[in-house]
Image (tube, grey):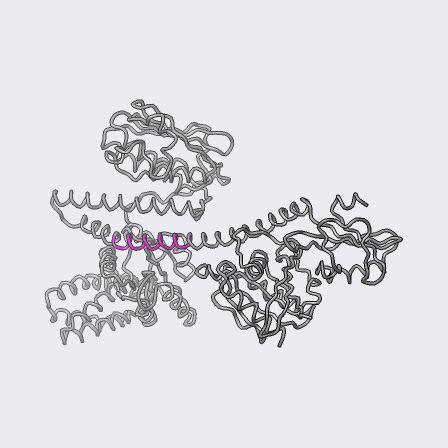
Amino acid sequence: MNLLAVLGFAVFERVGAGSFKLRGPAPGWLPVGPLERTFPFLEVFLPDAEEFWAAAQGYATLQSDLWTQDDRHFGATAVAGEQKFLIIERAGARFEQTQRVVQYAHEVSLARDQIAKLSRELERATEAKSEFLARMSHEIRTPLNALLGMAELLAETPLNDEQSRYVRIFRRAGDNLLTVINDVLDLSKVEAGQIELESIDFDLTEVLTEALEIAGVRARAKGLEIASRVEPVVPLRLNGDPGRLRQILLNLLGNATKFTEHGEIAVLVKQDGPGTLHFAVSDTGIGIPPDRLSSIFDNFSQADASTARRYGGTGLGLSISKRFVELMGGKIWAESAPGAGTTIHFTARLPAAESAAATPGPGVAPAPAISPLRILLADDSEENRFLIRGYLKESGSVIDEVENGAQAVERFERDNYDLVLMDSEMPVLDGYSATQQMRAFEKEHARARAPIFSLTAHALREARERSLAAGCTEHLTKPIKKAALLDAICRHAGAPQRTEVAVESWLQPVVGRYLENRRADVGKLRAALEAGDYTTIRTLGHQMAGSGGGYGFDPITEIGGALEESALVCDAARIRAAVEDLAIYLSRVQPSPV
Amino acid sequence: MTLKKKICMVGQFAVGKTSLVRRFVDQIYDDRYLATVGVKIDRKDISVGSSPLILMLWDLAGEDDLEQLKVSHLRGASGYIVVADGCRAASLAKAFELQKRIAEQVGELPFVLALNKADLREQWEIQAVPASGPGWTVFETSAKTGAGVQEMFAALAEKLLA
């Protein structure tokens, strides 16, 4: 029994219900007094123990929960057998260890809560960052759009040499600024995991040629040779993201040109295992010191601080290239020695395309000519409206301008348009909602879907998705280039609806002449309007009113009537509108045999 | 003989049940977090009006994913205190859940809700406690500064004698 005392046990024999007798020596820690008074916890344990003693067969034990009192830990055990015992045990190190384990588990739980909370906060912060970037890019791109557009228009006007030079510099500086903004956006998109690579079939030679052409302009201006070589085993039809590949090549070629004064720049493409290509862009330029070779791919890093001053650039190009290469499942590295030129190598997973058939690429055609259209232009910025009008001047299109989405919807429902150009952010009603309303109206009135282009300064992918989801046909990102706008118009609204008019066969030869003459009238009418010669307008209008319907061209009669009437009251605005209507009608009318 | 009442402290882990008892019984606060294993029993003699009262405070291990509150420990209790941590909204949800479980399994007993850690008020996720039915008495307490602690225990003691 001494052993029990040494171990810290107090052993009681149950002599009757709720009645216990201490067996053996009392441990030093055991206070004198009734058991339940000494250990309040037994109030809870003894009823369970009584049940256990009543039911137990043979030897068995029931252990209580642990409890703490007076800063000491205790446990109780009920023992059943020939005799019934209640053993009270005071904690040794065992309990402290238990406590440590329990505490550790609690702390892990707490930490997990904390991590969940932090990750929610981080998510909110990331959203705020994306929002900030989108906003910033919008704020910078909107005025830049106007600047670049105006420069483009200015370049098309007659200029003397000095003025031309200024405009060139003006445009180049604007383009550079745009590149910087795009780089920052690209980088943050990669960091936010928002860039997904395309996976389409493309021609390697096309991408190489384009990159070399663009980079070649500056290289040749510096007297540098520029060339590329593709090893014969490399498949020319590939599957991947041609846009990003071109961007990487342009970046590397741009750097090579920037840092090379004499010699040549070369691109070599080799096969590097199945489905992987190895590109090497080498130059004969100033080279990179060995200790900087690994850090040039970091953000905002240039070989040395004076580089930025001498050569310009943000130091983002290489780090963006690195991210793209990694997205393409490859790696990028540099080989160089100061004064001996630099070679940047990169690999990329670009498997051969499954379909061998080459589709003709869009090429670098000059801005296409488009036929005159009736266009609704909604933009709250006067500069942007002026710019678009300028871009479309030569097409002879009629453009109705409105300043917000609500006005746009109203005009759209009233008139038929060949095309709607819709700024996405406008007061009163934004472009997305206006587009939705227009689409709903078309559906309700069984009207054909007019092409609607959204014009936004948001370059982020979501902006595009949002536009298309709202029902837009095309999404153009500001700054909008003339060629891009005309290209899109060609694709979606290129052929205005032909108005077929049935003409008796014997009238056919005459009808051609008749329409020819009316087309000539358009010029005469414009000149007369310019000169304020209302008499001529009245006469021409009168003739049209009397003749058009006879050939089946009722609108010509209508327009003629309007011209005659408005010339009588010298209503120049109405005359201008009627002349434009006439021009458009004439561009569409198609006499067809009965 | 002086009246003796058993009061249980329940709530999510680390809301401050042990610290509240410690502050109330010994006027001490210790910044270290020490998880309670099993049950911790303390005694506090108080008086309500002119009558003395012994409170047996049963501080039950906090509930988390690993540990479930043993409702059997509330056997013989006269009332209980549900404790939540103002900095953790989840602990208030847990408090509501525990109260419901106790009411179902033990029956309607007087209780109060202690929103603890009032000294960290500016970090609180809980801005207001929704009225959860009659019988809810809410105290903002701080085991660290002692604010609201005496009042909270006294209010429960009065409910026990009412």
Q: Residue A502: tell me if it is visible.
A: no
- Residue at the image point whose x is 83% and y is 52% from the top: A60
Is A194 covered by the magenta stretch? no
- Residue A223: image quadrant is top left
Q: Nearer the viewer, residue B18 or A401?
A: B18
B107 to A187, vertically: above or below: below
Q: Position of residue A31 (x, y in %)?
A: 72, 55
Q: Position of residue A535 (x, y in %)?
A: 11, 71
The total of numbered circles placed on residues is 0
Where are the magenta residues, as a range?
A126-143
Is A142 covered by the magenta stretch? yes
Q: Is residue A26 left or right of residue A460?
A: right
Please identify the quadrant where the N terminus of chain A is shown: top right
- Residue A326: image quadrant is top left
Please identify the quadrant where the C terminus of chain A is shown: bottom left
- Residue at the image point whose x is 12% and y is 64% from the top: A530
Which SS type dominates the magenta stretch?
helix
Q: Position of residue B126 (x, y in %)?
A: 49, 64
Q: Residue A274: tell me if it is visible.
A: yes
A589 to A353, vertically: above or below: below
Q: Is residue A368 left or right of residue B44?
A: left
Q: Is residue A484 left or right of residue A445?
A: left
Q: Is residue A28 left or right of residue B89?
A: right
Q: Nearer the viewer, residue A196 or A134?
A: A134
Q: Nearer the viewer, residue B158 or A278?
A: B158
- Residue A516: image quadrant is bottom left
Q: Position of residue A135 (x, y in %)?
A: 33, 55
